[in-house]
Image (cartoon, rainbow, N blue to C red):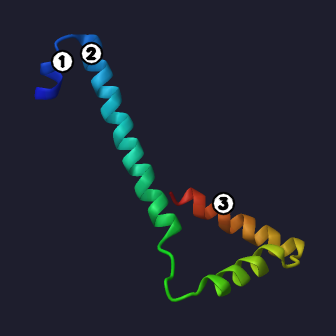
Amino acid sequence: MEAYASVGSDGAANVLVSQIQRNQTLQNTASSVGKATGLRDPTLPDKDRRTLIETMLLRLTTSNQMQKALLLAGLFILSF
């Protein structure tokens, strides 16, 4: 409450409130992204990581596999 009383006017208080809300939203978003991306596995060498990513991105997929992957991705996004 001291922060609101120290600004002096309603306009300044509204700006202060919007800044605090924005900062809280940014912090919440940052923590969600951190949970979603996780930590990089340091035991996996870059060469193996690149091979793994290339095979995941360039492999052939059937329509059923694609539908399952899209459903899983949608559920993952909705969980945040």
Taking the image as drawn, is residue 58 in sight? yes
Tag 1: Cα neighbours inside 10 Å, few (<14), some, or many (≥20)?
some
**Tag count:** 3
Taking 52 as reference, is 8 left or right? left
Q: Amino acid at mark 1?
A: Val
Q: Residue at x 66, y 87 (%)?
A: 48
For disc 2, the marked residue is 12
State the quadrant of the N terminus. top left
Give me the disc on residue 7: 1
How far across and down, in percent of the image, does residue 22 sit? 38, 35
Hey, which quadrant is residue 23 in on the image? Answer: top left
Question: Answer yes or no: do the residues labelled 3 and 2 have beta carbons within 8 Å?
Answer: no
Between disc 3 and disc 2, whose residue precedes? 2
- Between marks 3 and 1, how big is the CA–CA gap? 44 Å
For disc 3, the marked residue is 74
Q: Residue at x 83, y 75 (%)?
A: 58
Question: Answer yes or no: do the residues labelled 1 and 2 have beta carbons within 8 Å?
Answer: yes
Q: Mark 2 falls on what kind of element?
A: helix
The answer to whether residue 6 is above or below residue 30 is above
How far across and down, in percent of the image, does residue 46 sit? 62, 82
How far across and down, in percent of the image, does residue 64 sit? 85, 74
Question: Answer yes or no: do the residues labelled 3 and 1 have beta carbons within 8 Å?
Answer: no
- Between marks 3 and 2, how big is the CA–CA gap? 40 Å
Q: Residue at x 34, y 30 (%)?
A: 19
Tag 3: Cα neighbours inside 10 Å, few (<14), some, or many (≥20)?
few
